[in-house]
Image (cartoon, coloured by chain):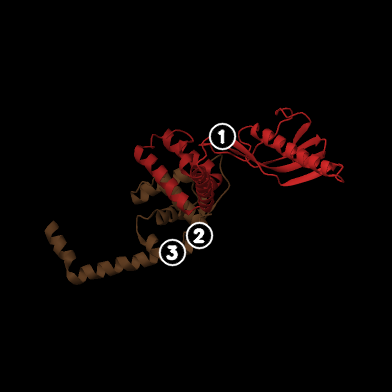
Chain colours: A red, B brown
Amino acid sequence: MKKRLWKRWYPRSWRNRYGEEYEQLLEDLAADNQMTWRSEVNVAQTGLALRRVYPGRRIALGIGTAAIVAVVAFAVGFGIRGTSAPHASFAIQRCTRVAPAQTSTPAAAQAKAKAFAAAAKAAGQVAKQLPKGSAAVHISVSTACPGGAFRIVGPVTFFLPGRIITPRGVLAPGALSTPAGVHVQQAA
Amino acid sequence: MPRSSRISNAELHHENDPLLLVLMGLAEGPKHGHALIGDIEQFAGVRLGPGTLYGAITRLEHEGFVEPLEPEERRRPYRITDTGVTALLGLLESMEDIVKIGRVRLQQCDLRSRLELEAG
């Protein structure tokens, strides 16, 4: 058996304890021409048997299985929703006014509503430009309109059919083209 | 450490059981893996595979029957513990009892003389 190939069969915790001396034994046997195919099968069999009794491996297997199940469920979820094209969605979680606006007159109130709509639209445009892998990234969009200045914060979910998306998206400075007067940053 | 690996007496009673052979090999004195394989082959006529040997050492160490010594380069010798000696003595005595019973029964059935007659 080639050097270190045997390690694939054995649990890590066992290798940490016995690995050095075991490898030396295999080298000694090989030097004496005593490593037959039977010996190699014996090495593999023992490794597999030890995997059944060493706890570290069982926990790792459990975590691995749970991760696979989660990924499959996520992928199946995409299929059920029938997503046919890449798209981004932006949910408004919080909208705060960052500059005062005149609200004492109907016209001022209307301007405020328009400003809010413009800010939301800008947020949607920004969301669509987010790079792949930007699932569930929180962004903050700031915009100033005649009716006032607003900051809208919410999660962006980026859907790609047939792709597994990891929630690791990061907005690089200058990576997005934003509408005039709109500033985007990743929210804390 | 292994999750559960209690060594039963039934396992050790088998004369070719690696656990018993390793204990007997170490009863002579501390040995590392390569020396153990050679020694066991010499006194028992059984050649243990490297995996079998280390599977046995793992279990025996876990049970406290053997203990590791300081490694000589990368070869680590093992030594039988007092617990291991006690267990081995008990097992050998029980095996002797079985041998005695077998001899007595052979005499009772007169099988021995019959075999001797056939051989003669």
Residue at image position (47%, 55%) is B59
Which x, y percent locates residue A37?
35, 37
Q: Earlier in the sequence, mark 2 or mark 3?
A: 2
Q: What residue type is labelled 1?
A: Pro
Residue nearer the viewer, B28 or B10:
B10
In this image, A83 relative to B8: left or right?
A: right
Which residue is found at the position 49% from the left and 42% from the top?
Answer: A79
Q: Say if labels 2 and 3 share a chain.
A: yes
- Image quarter of the C terminus of chain B: bottom left
Compared across the picture, whether A93 is left or right of B91 comes to: right
Q: Viewer-proximal residue, A86 or A113?
A: A113
- The percent position of residue B67, horizontal first and vertical second, equals 54, 54
The residue pinned by badge 2 equals: B63
The numbered mark 2 sits on a residue in which chain? Answer: B
**Badge 3 and badge 1 in a common chain:** no
Q: What's the distance in space between the residues labelled 1 and 2, CA to CA? A: 59 Å
The three-letter code of the residue at mark 3 reads Leu
Question: How far, Cα to Cα, is label 3 from label 1?
Answer: 74 Å
Q: Distance between the residues labelled 2 and 3?
A: 16 Å
The type of residue carrying mark 2 is Glu
Residue under the image location 78 percent in, 41 percent down:
A151
**Residue A115: quadrant of the picture:** top right
In this rendering, the label closer to the viewer, 3 or 1: 1
Q: Which chain carries label 3?
A: B
- Residue B89: mark: 3
Q: Is residue B106 above or below residue A8?
A: below
